[in-house]
Amino acid sequence: MSKNPPNYISTTNACKLCTPLGACLAFKGIEGAVPYLHGSQGCATYMRRYIIGHYNEPIDIASSSLSEKNAIYGGGPNLKMGLVNVTQKYQPKLIGIATTCMTETIGNDVGRYLHEFQRETVGTMPIMVRVATPSYNGTHMKGFHAAVTAVVEQLAKGREAVQEKINLLPGFISPADKRYFSEVIDDFGLDATILPDLSDTMGRATSKYDKIQPGGTPLASIATMGRASATIEFGRTLNGKTARLYWSAIWVRLPARSCKSMG
C-alpha cells in the first residue's frame, strides 16, 4: 500500500520569514513607542495576530495601508497621513517605522518622505525612527536587531563625555529574561540602559487596556548610550555592529540563553 504525498505546500513557521515582525517587537520595548508598518494593512494585521497569540495580550501596530494604486503612484501621501492619524490617536513619544516587502520592492524613498514631512510639521510630531525590513531580506531576528541598530544610530548622541553607566543589549529574549537582567543590574548597583526593554510593555496583561503600555527603555537613556563606559551585547551570531556604533570603552559579546522566546 503506497502513501501519496499531500497535494499542497505548507509553511511550519511563517514568521521566521517576517523581518518587520521582529522590528515591531523591538520598537515595543521603547518608552511611549508605537510600531508603524509602511506597507499594506494585511501585513500589520498578520503580525499583530501572531504576537497577540504568543503573548496572549493586545498589541497595536499601525499601518500606512497601501493598496494597488499606491504600488504604482507611490506611498508617500499614505505614509504622511498615517503618521498624522497615529499621532492624534495615540500621542506617542516615538513612532518606529518599518518597511515591508511592497514598499521596498517599489523603491519608496522613506528617508526623503520623512524629511519632507518633518519640514511640513515642524514641532508637532513625535520622534520618528525608520528601518528597512523587507521580509525577503531575513527572519524576524534580523528585523529585531536591525531596528535596535537603527534606534541607536538615529537617537544616541556622541561620546563627548563618558559616563559611569553601561549599555545592555540583551537580544531577542522573553520579557521574563529582561526582568531577571534588571534584578541582576540592581543587585550590582549599576546604572544601565537596557535596549529594548519589554519587561513591562509585553508579558504583563492587565484588565485595563492601554493604548501605549507603560514601561520600555526611556528615550532620555537612549540619547546617552553613546557616552556609556561599556556595552554588553548578548547573541552568539551577532557581529557587534550596534555595540560598536559609538566605540564604548569595553565591548563584550556573550551567547544568549533564552528561557522562552519566539527566537
Image: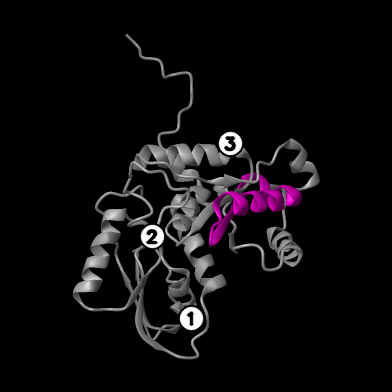
Q: Are marks 2 and 1 in contact (CB under 8 Å)?
A: no
The numbered mark at residue 246 is 1
Work out how far the residue at label 2 is from the one at label 1, CA to CA, in angstroms. Answer: 25 Å
- Label 1 packing within 10 angstroms: few (<14), some (14-19), many (20+): some
Residue 203 to residue 228: above or below: above
- Label 3 packing within 10 angstroms: few (<14), some (14-19), many (20+): few
What kind of residue is marked 2? Gly
The x and y percentages for residue 47 are: 49, 41
What is the span of residues highlighted in magenta in the rendered image?
75-103
Q: Residue furthest left?
A: 187
Residue at the location (42% across, 89% down)?
162
Work out how far the residue at label 3 is from the one at label 2, CA to CA, in angstroms. Answer: 28 Å
Q: Residue furthest front?
A: 208
Q: Magenta region's main secondary structure?
A: helix
Q: Which residue is mark 3?
A: 42
Work out how far the residue at label 3 is from the one at label 1, CA to CA, in angstroms. Answer: 37 Å
Mark in front: 2 vs 1: 2
